[in-house]
Image: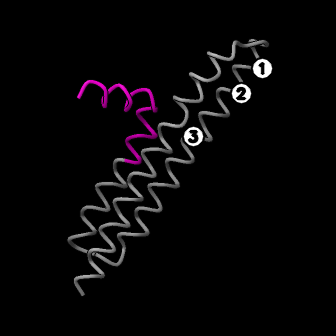
Amino acid sequence: MNGLFRLYVEGSVGWMTLVTLALVAVLIAAWKAPNWVRELGLIGLAIGMLGTLSGLCQASAEIIKVGDIAPSVLCGGMKVVLITTMYGVIVCLISVVIDLLHRARN
């Protein structure tokens, strides 16, 4: 569990919390409003992508300040920046699976 918490913190607590709220909304909607499940999953994906774009903008500003940067540092930063998008994709996939299961039942 320590690894998941580390990813949560590295991915930016603010953005990861917003994506987690989208996941909670997907799970609640699966029970209360099944027609909203897929859309809420897409919102989770969009929030994750916004988190990534925000991280890229911040990283670009820092690289401009520093000047030359080692490729290993750049790759490490890219890995961290993509965490929110990966989490958003997972939330979106969960919503699609729930939506498909709901449609198959009806």
Q: x%, y% of residue 32?
A: 22, 73
Instruction: Inspect the image, locate mark 1, and give the three-letter code of the amino acid beneath it.
Output: Ile
- Label 2–label 1 contact, CB within 8 A: yes
Marks 3 and 2 sit apart, C-alpha to C-alpha, by 12 Å
Which residue corresponds to the image point at 68% horizontal and 17% vertical from the top-left?
A: 71
Q: x%, y% of residue 22?
A: 37, 55
Disc nearer the start of the sequence (3/2)? 3
Residue 95 image-quadrant placement: bottom left
Marks 3 and 1 sit apart, C-alpha to C-alpha, by 18 Å
Q: Quadrant of the N terminus?
A: top left
Residue identified by numbered label 2: 60
Compared with 65, 86 (above or below) is: below
Span of residues in magenta: 1-19
Marks 2 and 1 sit apart, C-alpha to C-alpha, by 6 Å
Residue 68 image-quadrant placement: top right
User: What secondary structure is found at the residue carrying circle 3?
Assistant: helix
Disc nearer the start of the sequence (3/1)? 3
Instruction: Inspect the image, locate mark 2, and give the three-letter code of the amino acid beneath it.
Output: Ser
User: What secondary structure is found at the residue carrying circle 1?
Assistant: helix
The disc at residue 29 is none
Which residue corresponds to the image point at 42% horizontal and 59% vertical from the top-left?
A: 92
Residue identified by numbered label 3: 52
What color scheme is it?
A: one colour
Residue identified by numbered label 1: 64
**Majority secondary structure of the magenta segment?**
helix
| Nearest the eye: 42 or 71 | 71
Q: Quadrant of the C terminus?
A: bottom left
Instruction: Inspect the image, locate mark 3, and give the three-letter code of the amino acid beneath it.
Output: Thr
Q: x%, y% of residue 36?
A: 36, 73
